[in-house]
Image (cartoon, rainbow, N blue to C red):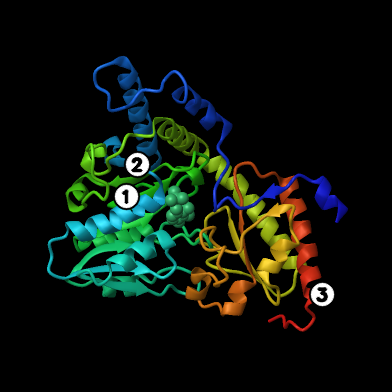
Amino acid sequence: MKKQRMHPPVYLDYHATTPVDPRVLEAMLPYFGPKFGNAASRTHRFGWEAEAAVEQARRQVAGLVGALPEEIIFTSGATESNNLAIKGVVEASRAERRHLVTVATEHHAVLDPVRRMEGQHLAVTILPPRPDGLVELDRLANAIGADTILVSVMFGNNEIGTLQPVGEIGAICRARGILFHSDAAQAAGRARIQVNDQKIDLMSLSAHKIYGPKGIGALYARRAARSRILPQIDGGGHESGLRSGTLNVPAIVGFGAACEIAAQEMETEQERVRQLRDRLQTRLLTELENSTVNGSIGNRLPNNLNVSFAGVDAAALLMKLPGVALSTGSACSSATPAPSHVLRAIGLSAEAARSSVRFGLGRFNTQEEIDFAAGQVIEAVREVRRDAPGARFG
Ligand SMILES: *Cc1c(COP(=O)(O)O)cnc(C)c1O
């Protein structure tokens, strides 16, 4: 594979993380240098300058999702935001019996905090999704009972890209006075988010999924929901007491810049990415028999493509593709051999789940890169199938 060594590697793992946009980096740099102040310092201009930058970023983040600036709580990322939302709501509830509803295809950063709280006066319903990954609204509504305090359903899935009917779920929850949390780490900047229209009370965001730096994110907490969560990190009372700790000003500035760019460019960028994704999908499906797309085709993030290549061990396939950065599932679980819990939840066998590859496209991919990657993947799938002639395709 001479061609492979000559071509620079193609990054198709934008669900795992995204490169920092050069404009974001530029916005951050002064805050590593002369503008180094502590945003909580109230007695001099170094502090004021940092605070002003943080407040501008808060407006930029809020602007992307239709929130008020004071509804944005900066955290270290979507993992922390999910933990704060779930543990914070459960701990704040004074109810004798508490119940939470979520879905089997959630990120581990939702499922694991839920499991930790389960039993601590918390009963949990984990809904199975439909085979296309969508939650059934009737089922969700029926799962809500008198003790239910929180419903947590992600906005866009990080493996199969499925976009949940968030607005409908929000309406069901609001009508019954139950808090609705959504993990929007993947959907922000890729799908339309308007927290008021969609009746979202709590929402997790992450900068590094939208061309910002790692280690920064936010929890959106609707004004009326703030008194219904308890902080998980206590200290100096930063972020209105909901998340203590000196603010990471350069990262917050970068997060804000990333949100501003996303808000301005989302429509054109996502249409371009969608066309690249469709081009890749068409080529893979027409040239490789027994390949199937996982998850909903119509309700999907524009940058996501998850394909099962029957008879192919995806881990072995990726070994043959040093020139294309791909993943077999979420970055957090791809170090373990267990097949994806998301693919299993939508009904794939363990074998089919192990034959699946996640393609995540993004801002810096070109058509030339997509064509190169498609060629490499097609060649590698054929090779793996030749090497394992005993494998049945189907
Ligand atoms: C990446 C991701 C997370 C974790 O976000 P971090 O900011 O890395 O903690 C949570 N949920 C989803 C859906 C993600 O894609």
Q: Disc 3 marks which amino acid?
A: Arg
Label 2 close to label 1 by CB (< 8 Å): yes
Indicate whether 17 appears above or below 298.
Answer: above
Q: Earlier in the sequence, mark 1 or mark 3?
A: 1
Q: Which mark is residue 66?
A: 2
Q: Nearer the viewer, mark 2 or mark 1?
A: 2
- x and y, in percent, of residue 215 in the image: 44, 43
Indicate whether 367 appears above or below 56.
Answer: below
As measured in the structure, the alpha-carbon distance from the residue carrying label 2 to the one carrying label 1 is 9 Å
Indicate whether 48 appears above or below 356.
Answer: above
Q: Disc 2 marks which amino acid?
A: Gly
Q: Earlier in the sequence, mark 2 or mark 3?
A: 2
Indicate whether 42 appears above or below 115.
Answer: above
**Quarter in which the C terminus is drawn:** bottom right
Disc 1 marks which residue? 197
Q: Quadrant of residue 115?
A: bottom left
Label 1 close to label 3 by CB (< 8 Å): no
Disc 3 marks which residue? 386
Q: Which residue occupies the foreground of this view, 300 or 46? A: 46
**149 relative position to 245: left or right:** left
- x and y, in percent, of residue 25 in the image: 53, 30
Mark 2 Cα shell of 10 Å, populated few (<14), some (14-19), many (≥20):
some
Does residue 199 appear anywhere in the picture?
A: no
| Residue appearing at x 71%, y 68% in the figure | 316
| Residue appearing at x 40%, y 40% in the figure | 64
**378 relative position to 185: left or right:** right
Q: Earlier in the sequence, mark 2 or mark 1?
A: 2
- x and y, in percent, of residue 340 in the image: 53, 69
